Amino acid sequence: MELLSAIETRKSIRAFTKEPVPREIIKKILEVTLRAPSGSNTQPWEFTVVSGEVLENIKGDNIEKLLSGTVVNSRSNGYIGIHRERKVELAKDIFALMKIEREDREKRLEWLMRGFRFFDAPAAIIIAADKSLEGSWSMFDIGAVSQTICLAAVNYGIGTCIEEQGVVFQDVIRKNTSISEDKEVIIGIALGYPDPDHPANKLVSRRESLDVITDWLGF
């Protein structure tokens, strides 16, 4: 697929078929992803790819902690103003597609749990970085490498969803992987073949027009 087409058609996939993603395809995705840009070529990213029993254990432990009432310390909790409005708008659009009413706590909880289960994807990539990089350009670099993974995946018909819920309980991730305490778990990416019939996958999130967010100077 051409690069511009991949950029235009890529979207977050929140429902997958049960078909496993071959390790060789994930390896090819990550190999090309290594060309992602990073500040001064520091390449701060470290990948842990999980599937099968390991991923199922993470999903189960996440749900257990969530239902136990453990506080979720999410980086996205502090959004205000237009940024919060966009976040709320996205949630409303998803719930409308899923036919989840605002008062339906049971369905809202089930949807929440899907996020902590990596949307039931058959594989996931967990991205971590050394804690010594905190406050540096590394978060920008992790963003660049995350998008590169998602664009490369499009070439193989693989759907992705960059999401924090699956890795927000860092103790769960460390328990089930080899990620050590001196590493910060940054983000997770769910991978799998998109379920074309699932209503959530019909969502195309809205974007502000270029005129709203761009100033042109000197032209």
Image: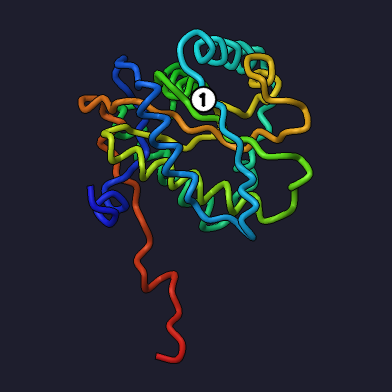
> How would you rate the neighbour count of disc 1 (Cα within 10 Å): few for under 14, some for 14-19, many for 20 or more?
some
In the rendered structure, the answer to whether residue 135 lies left or right of residue 43 reads right
At a point 26% along the width and 29% down the height, the residue shown is: 199
Q: Nearer the viewer, residue 72 or 10?
A: 10
Q: Nearer the viewer, residue 204 or 126?
A: 126
At a point 67% along the width and 39% down the height, the residue shown is: 129
Q: Position of residue 121 (x, y in %)?
A: 40, 21
- Helix, strand or loop at label 1? It is strand
Q: Nearer the viewer, residue 27 or 63?
A: 27
Q: Amino acid at mark 1?
A: Val
Q: Position of residue 8 (x, y in %)?
A: 28, 53
In the rendered image, which quarter is residue 69 located in?
top right
Q: Nearer the viewer, residue 95 or 11?
A: 11
Looking at the image, can residue 104 be seen?
no
At a point 36% along the width and 42% down the height, the residue shown is: 152
Q: Is residue 89 above or below residue 15?
A: below
Q: Position of residue 218 (x, y in %)?
A: 45, 91
Which residue matches tag 1? 49
At a point 29% along the width and 16% down the height, the residue shown is: 19
Residue furthest bottom in the image: 218
Q: Is residue 133 above or below residue 190?
A: below
In the rendered image, which quarter is residue 24 located in?
top left
Looking at the image, can residue 126 be seen?
yes
Q: Is residue 75 above or below residue 212?
A: above
In the rendered structure, the answer to whether residue 136 lies left or right of residue 154 reads right
Quadrant holding the C terminus: bottom left
